[in-house]
Image (tube, rainbow, N blue to C red):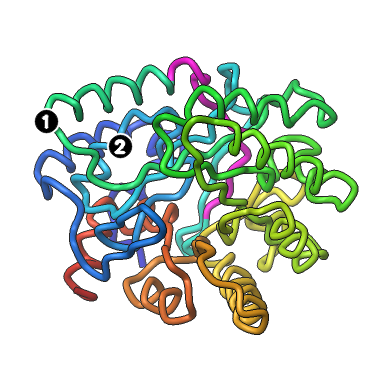
Amino acid sequence: MLTKPWLLLPSHWLYSLSPIVLKFYSHINSDQPYKWKTVKWRNLSFPNPLGIAGGLDKNATYIKDYWKLGAGFVEVGTVTPKAQHSNPHKILDRSVKHLSLWNNMGFPNRGLDFVKNRLEILFEESNEGKKILSPIFINIGKNRDTPISQAVEDYKKSMEALYPFASAFVINISSPNTKDLRELFKEKNLYHFLNTLHELRLSLKINRPLILKLSPDEDNFMQIIEQSLSVGIDGWCICNSTIKRPVKNIFPEDRGGLSGRLLGETSLGLLKQLKAYLEKNQIKDKLVISCGGVLTAQDVLERLNLGADLVQVYSALVFKGFGFFKSVYKELA
């Protein structure tokens, strides 16, 4: 049953109007993130473990608004060195019945220089007495016209430019909407790619954690975990959208990624698999972020009970609205 009036709007209208609604709603909401189940990891403090996934604030434009909604951390991006538009043709759709989204955006953003400027303004305000209220993760990717053989150079550019502002970098090679991007997960590519970024971050003045965003569609999932551990990765985000279609004939099957409720079971399974591996091998101090199919407070609690340190939402804000953080706080705090 349709209970949210905004879901009567076409997907592309809702996408265009959501920044206006976000600004309005944030002004009548909390002044800062809610405090519940606070998390401390290394030198980072999270007011609560619930934050936004990459793709919601592509250009670091709405960080303060998400803080006001109550988010315990924010992830901006995906940022690419050069500005770029969405992929051609249809890029958005949804199924209210299945509480699931489909997108084929392909890292649309205003580019590295714009995001850097937005973050500089935010940090200048902080120096004037306004605080950075939660960790800021920066999700980085490659431009679609950059060959895979040169992809690491795009990630290096973003890291070098944005490291003063990043609490951590989320390395996004898992989007299904940039051609051949997931080729970087192959064994012949992954070690060199991640090791190059690891060596770069060690050379920077401030060492920032690297979080690898994982794909739900790779057959060599545990091999990816082991290989990323061997080059000093600091954590993982599980997981990006999927090219699989658990329910047929809803969304295009030849392109785009599926997220929301239909991704939930896969996301949960990968979280359990990763946590079992880490516990078996007594690997500690790695950050585990669960994302995909989180639509209720009980979903959030389930991910935390299964061992996730942090939880991210995207589809929940579409189907449940911007009051989601407040409702989770009221139910779980």
- Check residue 186 for magenta coloring: no
Please indicate whether residue 167 sits to the left or right of residue 198 in the image: left
Q: Is residue 49 above or below residue 166?
A: below
Q: Is residue 238 above or below residue 14?
A: below
Which residue position is annotated with label 2? Answer: 63
Viewer-side label of 1, 2: 1
Q: What's the residue at 70%, 45% (across, down)?
A: 176
- Check residue 102 for magenta coloring: yes
Marks 1 and 2, the one that precedes in the sequence:
2
Q: Nearer the viewer, residue 312 or 176?
A: 312
Q: Nearer the viewer, residue 144 or 225?
A: 225
Q: What's the residue at 59%, 20% (across, down)?
A: 81
Disc 1 element: loop
Q: CA distance from mark 1 to mark 2?
A: 17 Å
The amino acid sitting under disc 1 is: Gly
- Can you tell which quarter of the image residue 247 is in? bottom right
Please indicate whether residue 207 sits to the left or right of residue 38 in the image: right
Numbered badge on residue 129? 1
Query: Which image quadrant: the C terminus?
Result: bottom left
Q: Nearer the viewer, residue 124 or 147?
A: 124
* Residue count near mark 1 (Cα–Cα under 10 Å), binned few <14, some 14–19, many ≥20: few
Q: What's the residue at 22%, 44% (across, down)?
A: 133
Query: Which image quadrant: the N terminus?
Result: bottom left
Region in magenta: 101-114
Q: Position of residue 188 (x, y in %)?
A: 90, 47
Q: Position of residue 120 (x, y in %)?
A: 33, 21
Asked if marks 1 and 2 touch (Cβ < 8 Å), the reply is: no
